[in-house]
């Protein structure tokens, strides 16, 4: 029984969701809650990937449209749309996604680094790695790098 405890500590719980037609994942430890769509207040002169803000029990939370942030295709079915509320850097933000799929447990060995040719072409370290689950390949987002330094600065002006 004592051998199982250290192994479980190395497992990561990954929330798998859809953005457009793509499956993505993120470490569930940063997720605070998941919400159904609600009234969004748009903000003038906000970055294009910021949908606006919502009032979450008295706190103003900026919504990041992951489809726009990751330059994915159309959003698709709005009935399954969800807001994943999580901590990104020092902010609490909502990530707008098409739908939630599942929560999976992965060991560190299950998450492989990006191929070097791909990582050289990316602007930031947005991806923590890639998980292979059966026949599926799921990119795992690195929320600490989903925003550039300039975008973090812009976001800090919104949340004041």
Image (tube, helix red, strand yellow):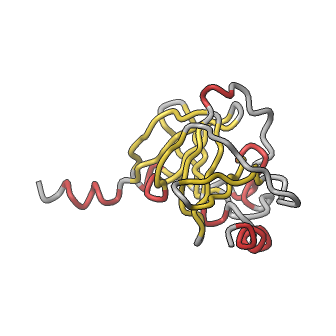
Q: Residue at x 11, y 53 (%)?
A: 1
Find residue 120 and report its image quarter.
bottom right
Spot the residue most to the right.
45
Task: Estimate the x, y position of residue 26 in percent, counting from the top left.
Answer: 53, 51
Exactly how many numbered labels are in the figure?
A: 0
Choose between 46 and 77: the one closer to the eye. 46
Task: Estimate the x, y position of residue 34 in percent, counting from the top left.
Answer: 50, 44
Horizontally, is 129 left or right of 119 in the view?
left
Task: Estimate the x, y position of residue 45 in percent, counting from the top left.
Answer: 88, 60
Spot the residue most to the left.
1
Choose between 82 and 114: the one closer to the eye. 82
Q: Quadrant of the C terminus?
A: bottom right
Q: Is residue 43 above or below residue 82?
A: below
Choose between 43 and 147: the one closer to the eye. 43
Q: Residue at x 70, y 52 (%)?
A: 64
Q: Is residue 53 above or below residue 74?
A: below
Q: Residue at x 59, y 38 (%)?
A: 82
Q: Residue at x 42, y 41 (%)?
A: 104
Q: Is residue 17 above or below residue 69?
A: above
Choose between 13 and 83: the one closer to the eye. 83
Horizontally, is 137 left or right of 11 in the view?
right
Spot the residue most to the front.
58
Horizontally, is 152 left or right of 23 in the view?
right
Horizontally, is 147 left or right of 3 in the view?
right
Task: Estimate the x, y position of residue 154 in percent, counting from the top left.
Answer: 78, 70
């Amino acid at each position: 029984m004592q051998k199982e405890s250290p192994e479980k500590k190395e497992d990561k719980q990954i929330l798998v969701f859809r953005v457009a037609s793509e499956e993505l994942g993120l470490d569930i430890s940063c997720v605070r809650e998941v919400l159904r769509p609600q009234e969004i207040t748009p903000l003038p002169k906000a970055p294009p990937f910021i949908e606006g803000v919502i009032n979450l029990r008295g706190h103003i939370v900026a919504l990041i449209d992951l489809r726009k942030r990751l330059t994915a295709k159309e959003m698709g079915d709005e009935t399954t749309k969800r807001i994943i509320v999580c901590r990104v850097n020092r902010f609490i933000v909502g990530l707008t996604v098409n739908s939630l799929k599942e929560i999976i447990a992965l060991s560190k060995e299950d998450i492989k680094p990006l191929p070097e040719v791909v990582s050289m072409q990316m602007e930031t370290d947005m991806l923590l790695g890639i998980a292979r689950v059966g026949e599926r390949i799921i990119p795992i987002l690195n929320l600490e790098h989903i925003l550039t330094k300039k975008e973090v600065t812009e976001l800090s002006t919104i949340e004041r």
